[in-house]
Image (cartoon, rainbow, N blue to C red):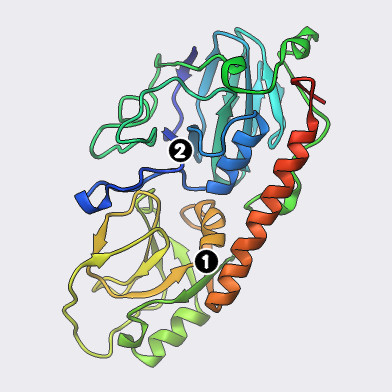
Amino acid sequence: MIRVVKAGLSDTIQDSGRSGYQQFGVIHSGTMDSVSSRIANLLVGNAEGEAVLEMTLLGPRLLFEKDVLLSLCGGEFTPEIDGVPVPLWRPVAIKKNSVLTIGPATRGCRLVMAVAGGFDLPEALGSHSTYINARFGGFQGRSLEKDDLLPVKRPWETSPMRMEHMMQGRLPFLTVTWSVAKKLRPLAEEPFTIRVLPGIQINLFTKQSQKDFAASIFKVDSKSDRMGYRLQGPLLKLSEPQELLSEAVTFGSVQVPSNGQPIILMADHQTTGGYPKIAQVITADLPLLAQAKPGDSIQFREVSIHTAQKLLQQVEETINELRIGIKLKFINGGIQ
């Protein structure tokens, strides 16, 4: 079990999302930063879509009531185990009765924690993702709170990694000397450059608004959340008033409501929307976008569909190289 000593700002269980139910109005949800989640799971020997604990801006304090192999990936936070700084992007074996404290983000917005074997929680509609508004999925359909007990599966039941031999040192945890290459870490300098495809209704906007969207820097508004990022920037106007029928929307759709300020739909986006869409964030840049926090700056850059596909292919190829590299580190069921 993992006991929540102190809750963070928003700690929810997420996996790769809930597929097949948007036609019934159930959101897809899932982790905001899919690359960090996949890598975190790879580092502890899990399937890449296994559920992780997603933390936003300020993490929790957790007491581990048994030995656990874990990994922390995503934005730059300052985690400590019993007061000893613990590195990110590596497998970490934490000893029973140790306390993990995850402080505020120093860069980026979200951190995920994977545990070997995964969290022992029931699925809801085929997923472990938390749907807070409907109060189901994840841990009791909500963010973690003080004194919650988060069950963890026995790692040796599902993971090829064993950690008994790692538990013989004096520190409250042990880790390895290698880590994930920086090129896979979703962090960028401001302004975040986010690549987009033209939206299906881009031609409904004035030429000046199209230019402003491409050339301006937008600020992430404080009202942003897992459902959508509200942006502040130049007003984007339609050439003439339009009444649009609602249609399917997706993670990364950039829609513009009547106030002229764009909204980027994020992991907990609604299933349909009727606002005109000026752009679509490419899939390869969604993990980077997930690390933008209120107050950060974003600049959009249009690319072709061919480039978008090539960039996504590069991400998958790099993860595949990492997958092979981690597999080679598994020596006789342990970690080298």
Examine the rendering and report whether any part of residue 63 can be seen.
yes
Examine the rendering and report whether any part of residue 190 can be seen.
no
Quadrant position of residue 178? top right
Q: Which residue is mark 2?
A: 15
Q: Is residue 226 above or below residue 257?
A: above
Q: What residue is rendered at 27% in x and 51% in y?
A: 22
Q: Secondary structure at mark 1?
A: strand
Q: Which residue is mark 1?
A: 298
Q: Is residue 256 above or below residue 52?
A: below
Residue 89 image offset from top left, x and y in percent:
69, 37
Q: What residue is rendered at 76% in x and 20% in y?
A: 334
**Mark 2 or mark 1, which is nearer to you?**
2
Q: Is residue 277 left or right of residue 105?
A: left
Residue situated in front as seen by the camera: 35 or 299: 35
Residue 57 image offset from top left, x and y in percent:
50, 41
Residue 83 image offset from top left, x and y in percent:
68, 19
Q: Secondary structure at mark 2?
A: loop
Q: Is residue 107 left or right of residue 34?
A: right
Which of the labelled discs sits on residue 14, or is there none? none
At label 2, counting other C-alpha atoms closer than 10 Å, the crowd grade (few under 14, some 14-19, many 20 or more) is many
Residue 14 image offset from top left, x and y in percent:
43, 37
